[in-house]
Amino acid sequence: MTFNPGARLDPSEVEDVRGSGRFGGGFGGMGRTPVIVGGGGLGLVLTIAIIVLNSGILGGSGFSDVTGAGPESSSLASCQTGADANARDDCRIVGFVDSVQAFWSQEFQQSGQTYQKATTVLFTDQTDTGCGPATTAVGPFYCPNDGYVYLDLGFFNELRTQLGATGGPLAEGYVVGHEYGHHIQDLLGQLTAGGGTGANSQSVKTELQADCYAGVWIDNAASTGLLQAPTDAQIADALNAAQAVGDDRIQQETQGQVNPETWTHGSSAQRQHWLTVGMQTGDPSACTP
């Protein structure tokens, strides 16, 4: 998607800890089941997955402060306009996060609810989270224990080079929108640990609903004032990314066979379908796989 050049960005919604290598304690479970939702690392599952972590790795309480990690002291401080988002990868993520949260804030307000913002953390190599330590192998994910989205920008290169996606800005926006879809599920009480495996499992339904929520945002993104309406080519890029992370496609490419009984995210066709439902209806109530 293309950002309106004069649109103002808010880099405070994204925390930059790239290069800090923070790892090893300092985060708490806050009394909730430690799960990472939406992880998509090539080293582990090659898709946007659900990963349950060992509760023994959690320690302390709350989200630890990292000196020099905030937007004011990082390169994100210069992400000020839509022109910056069109020119720089990290600023583009700032813009997507701003737009996603602006839309859901409006949506919640219209339904008489209050939206609670989720910060996105940009990291490299490894980081600590409220769900335990994580590496880039996990891929983009949402941690309900601390309410943060975690993202390594290198994932988008892997999406193209190792999963065969065409890439493009809206493919990246789809991934961001999907992770915030899990945040919406969390706020609405729709996000639960576990869910089993299989084409009709709760795990798959959870991921497909997050895809649909991403599509709902895409359909409404222009209304936030930050983005222009997506072109047909950009929509095709997003659908291609959804296809690339389908369980069946990944299993075929990595194992040479497809086993629907082990699916946790849905087939390429399912993921494309529910992303399309969101984009065509623009209505969160339509997102019930």
Image (cartoon, grey):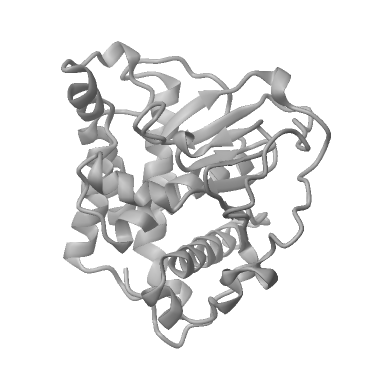
Coordinates of residue 17 in the picture (x, y in percent): 62, 55
In the displayed image of the protein, which residue is found farthest to the bottom? 6
- Quadrant the C terminus occupies: top left
| Looking at the image, residue 247 lies above or below residue 152 | above
Where on the picture, by quarter, is residue 77? bottom right
| Residue drawn at (19%, 26%) of the image | 253
Coordinates of residue 56 in the picture (x, y in percent): 72, 18
Q: Is residue 215 visible?
A: no
Coordinates of residue 52 in the picture (x, y in percent): 56, 22
Q: In the displayed structure, does residue 277 sit left or right of residue 91?
A: left
Q: Nearer the viewer, residue 237 or 202?
A: 237
| Residue drawn at (23%, 59%) of the image | 235
| Looking at the image, residue 104 lies above or below residue 160 | below
Q: Nearer the viewer, residue 95 or 227?
A: 95
- Quadrant the N terminus occupies: bottom left
Q: In the displayed structure, does residue 90 sit left or right of residue 28?
A: left
| Looking at the image, residue 236 lies above or below residue 148 | below
Where on the picture, by quarter, is residue 245? top left
